[in-house]
Amino acid sequence: MNKICSDSKGFTLLESMIALAVLAVGLLGLAQLFVVAITQNTYGRTNTMAVSVATDKLESLHNNFNNDLALGVPSADMTAGDHGPSTVTIVPPSNSNQGTYSYNVAWTVTFVNGNERDVSVTVSPSKSNIKFNRVITLASHFAP
């Protein structure tokens, strides 16, 4: 007869199965975290590009404003009222795996006092990247 020793060491099959189940639940949670991180990274990149487009347009309008003051003739972009929308497309480098993003840019010019202008630039995603539908608006006051 074999003698069963009560001081045996190691894990039982049931303990191993429970440990594997706990590990599997933890790994599934971690996998979901990766999906959320990738989505938020894409969302952040889209918003950053939209802010960059708005900033570029605002700088361009400020340069037009300064040229208008120097020449004494207002440009079409700096007349009072709503302008646009125009479409700006950002194409990534050829060795990148990022997609192409398109944005609609519109701006409003309001005359304040004399040569002063209030300018508001609005950038919204076009239909190609509508998944992240956040409108960015930047405003500035131009004065001589």
Image (cartoon, grey):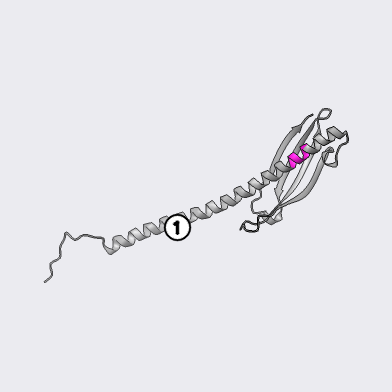
Q: Which residues are magenta?
A: 57-62
Does the magenta segment cover residue 31? no
Q: Is 132 drawn above or below residue 18 in the view shown?
A: above
Asked whether, in this view, residue 68 is left or right of residue 127, the answer is right
The residue sitting at the top extreme is 113
The image quadrant that residue 52 belongs to is top right
Asked whether, in this view, residue 142 is left or right of residue 8, the answer is right
Instruction: Name the residue located 81 percent from the left edge and 42 percent from the top edge.
Output: 82
Q: Position of residue 118 (x, y in %)?
A: 77, 34
The image quadrant that residue 96 belongs to is bottom right
Between 54 and 33, the one nearer to me in the picture: 54
Magenta-drawn stretch, dominant element (helix, strand or loop): helix
Q: Position of residue 122 (x, y in %)?
A: 73, 43
Q: Quadrant of the C terminus?
A: top right
Amino acid of disc 1: Leu
Whether residue 90 is visible here, answered yes or no, is yes
Between 13 and 57, the one nearer to me in the picture: 57
Q: Position of residue 113 (x, y in %)?
A: 82, 27
Judging from the image, what secondary structure is the residue with disc 1 in?
A: helix
Q: Which residue is mark 1?
A: 28
Asked whether, in this view, residue 8 is left or right of residue 31, the answer is left
Instruction: Name the residue located 67 percent from the left edge and 43 percent from the top edge.
Output: 51
Q: Position of residue 60 (x, y in %)?
A: 76, 41
Asked whether, in this view, residue 46 is left or right of residue 3, the answer is right
